[in-house]
Every structure is written in C-alpha cells, then in structure tokens.
C-alpha cells in the first residue's frame, strides 16, 4: 500500500484527493497536512500534522495542491528530506520555479499546471497548430471560479508556452496580459493571455488561431475537479518508480 501525504488536505482539490484515495486499492491517504481545522471528518487512521517535515518523513509520496508560498516551504523541507512529489499548485514565481528545478536533482518531482489528459493533449495540439498556422494570430482566454487566487491560470501559461515554442519564440518576450486605450494595431508575434473570473467554473481554456477569412478555436472545459484529483493520484503512483528529475503529466501518460 502506497502511503500518500497530502499538502493542502483541507482545500477543494485536497478533499477530493482524500475521497479518491479512501477508495483506492493501491494507495491510501496516510498523512494529511492541515493548518486550520477540517470542515469535514478526515479518515480515522490518517496522521494529521501541521508540520511539513513530518508530512515528508511519514509519506512515500506527497501530493501538493496549496498556494505558491506553501509549495516553496514544501520544497525547502524536501531538500532536507527528499521524497517523491506531485505538485499541482500554480502561480509559482521565478524563485519558486528555480527551487523546483533544484529539488528535482535530489528526488523525482512531477509538476503540472493541469493534471487532466485533455489538457496534456491540447498542449501538443497547440504547439502543432502554432507551427503549421504561422500567419495566424494567437489569443488565449481562461475562465475560472470566483475563488481562484492566481491569474492567469497556470494552464493558460503552459498553453502559451507551447504556442510560443511552436514558433521558436519565448513566451516571456511576446506575452501581453491586457489591452486598454489607444494601444495601436496588434503586433504579429504577440500572444495575449486573458483571465475571466466568476461563479463556480471549474476551468475553461480556449486557444484561438485567427487569420483573414478563417479561424480555429481549441477549447478544453473541465466539468469536474475530480479530473485533477484522479490525474494527480495516477501521477503519484507513477512518480515513486522514477529516478530523480523533473517530470510532467505528459511523461506519466506516455504522450
Ligand atoms: N494542476 C492542476 O491540475 C490543478 C491545480 N490547481 C491549483 O492548486 C492550488 C490549490 O487549488 P484549490 O484546492 O482550489 O485551493 P484551495 O484554496 O481550496 O486549497 C488550498 C489549500 O492549501 C492550504 N494552504 C494555504 N496556505 C498554505 C500554506 N502556506 N502552506 C500549506 N498549505 C496552505 C489551504 O489551507 P487552509 O484551508 O487552512 O487555508 C488549503 O488546504 C491552486 O494553486 C490551483 O491553481 C487547482 C486545480 C487543478
Ligand atoms: O485554481 C483552479 O481551480 C485551477 N487551477 C489550475 C490552473 O491554474 O491552471 C488548473 C485548473 O484550471 C483549475
């Protein structure tokens, strides 16, 4: 039985990880990291802790769905006690992304801004379309629930990276995140990534390729957050058998 630790166990995704792991035949929710009280009853036999090092020491693998500073603390502690990690938290800053790469020299880490199969395939399609439709303007729109803290979504940024890569560009050089006022005509290479927030939208991403006379829009809609929890659990079972290094969900899915 794989002993899974959950960082962010009281959160929207964390709670679904517990629900899915309770029913799992190969893995169980063994250590739950929580800062505040649970608003639900956690499994009786799980260890509950607010100490990150204890979480790592008692787990075969830790799944993290928290907030960027939470992931930073997890990675700092994992450098003291290397443990296979699955990280889904988005909004990591440059320092935190570098920490992720550094930690991956010492343990296997799967980091993905979206744990769904659909988005993993969409990333591939976007890169191909970007390369093939070299004259088309690329625009990305993401929509999420009102509680989401970071913008744009990690998924939208990853889709943008694939779109830029398809044209041999670096997203940081061509990304824009808003338009307002007399800004002039659109430049050829720019890739806009716009964020909408409202209601209970689980996650919706549209990548549009626009030209004179035609356009293509590729859309992915997550209709259930369970998709992310199931993807992360699949990743946890896979990452424990990998050598040290940084992986994505595409590696786990063999794409
Ligand atoms: N990769 C993917 O497929 C997906 C990624 N996400 C990302 O996962 C993250 C979490 O999403 P979601 O579950 O909706 O968010 P929630 O706000 O519902 O949950 C966040 C969890 O993190 C805990 N937390 C907050 N601050 C810290 C900290 N400093 N250290 C440790 N734990 C902390 C919270 O505890 P408390 O309740 O006590 O504040 C809570 O348990 C976000 O970054 C989101 O973008 C979401 C869905 C899919
Ligand atoms: O916060 C969310 O809810 C989600 N976050 C991820 C992101 O930022 O891309 C993945 C998914 O879209 C849901």
Image (cartoon, grey):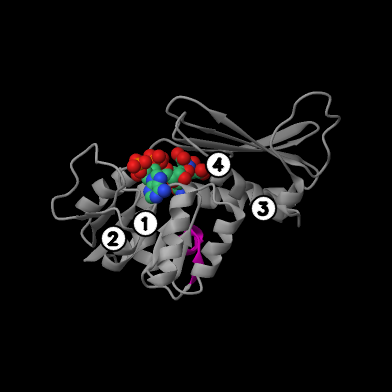
* Residue 192: image location, x then y, percent: 70, 38
SS under mark 3: helix
Q: Residue at x 71, y 50 (%)?
A: 171
Query: Residue 217 sits in which quadrant?
Result: top right
Q: Which mark is nearer the camera, 3 or 1?
A: 1
Q: Are marks 2 and 1 in contact (CB under 8 Å)?
A: yes
State yes or no: residue 118 in magenta: no
Residue farthest along the left direction in this orientation: 44
User: Mark 3 and mark 1: span between their CA atoms?
Assistant: 31 Å
Find the magenta span and give its range.
Answer: 245-255
Q: Are marks 3 and 1 in contact (CB under 8 Å)?
A: no
- Which residue is label 2 attached to? 4
Query: Residue 62 sits in which quadrant?
Result: bottom left
N-terminal-most mark, 2 or 1: 2
- Which residue is label 4 attached to? 153
Which residue is at the front of the view, 44 or 115?
44
């Amino acid at each position: 039985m794989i002993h899974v630790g959950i960082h962010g166990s009281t959160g929207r995704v964390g709670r679904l990880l517990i629900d899915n792991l309770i029913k799992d035949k190969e893995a169980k929710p063994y250590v739950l990291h929580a800062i505040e009280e649970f608003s639900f009853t956690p499994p009786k036999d799980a260890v509950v802790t607010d100490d990150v090092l204890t979480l790592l020491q008692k787990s075969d693998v830790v799944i993290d769905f928290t907030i960027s500073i939470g992931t930073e603390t997890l990675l700092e502690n994992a450098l003291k006690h290397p443990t296979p990690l699955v990280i889904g938290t988005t909004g990591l800053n440059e320092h935190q992304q570098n920490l992720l790469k550094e930690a991956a020299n010492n343990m296997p880490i799967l980091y993905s801004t979206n744990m769904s199969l659909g988005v993993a395939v969409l990333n591939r399609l976007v890169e191909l379309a970007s390369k093939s439709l070299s004259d088309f303007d690329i625009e990305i729109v993401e929509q999420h629930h009102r509680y989401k803290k970071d913008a744009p979504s990690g998924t939208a940024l990853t889709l943008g990276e694939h779109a830029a890569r398809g044209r041999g560009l670096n997203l940081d050089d061509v990304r824009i995140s808003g338009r307002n006022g007399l800004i002039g005509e659109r430049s050829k290479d720019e890739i806009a990534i716009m964020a909408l927030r409202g209601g209970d939208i689980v996650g919706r991403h549209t990548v549009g390729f626009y030209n004179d006379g035609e356009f293509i829009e590729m859309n992915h809609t997550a209709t259930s957050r369970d998709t992310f929890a199931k993807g992360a659990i699949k990743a946890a079972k896979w990452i424990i058998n990998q050598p040290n290094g940084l992986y994505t969900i595409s590696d786990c899915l063999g794409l």
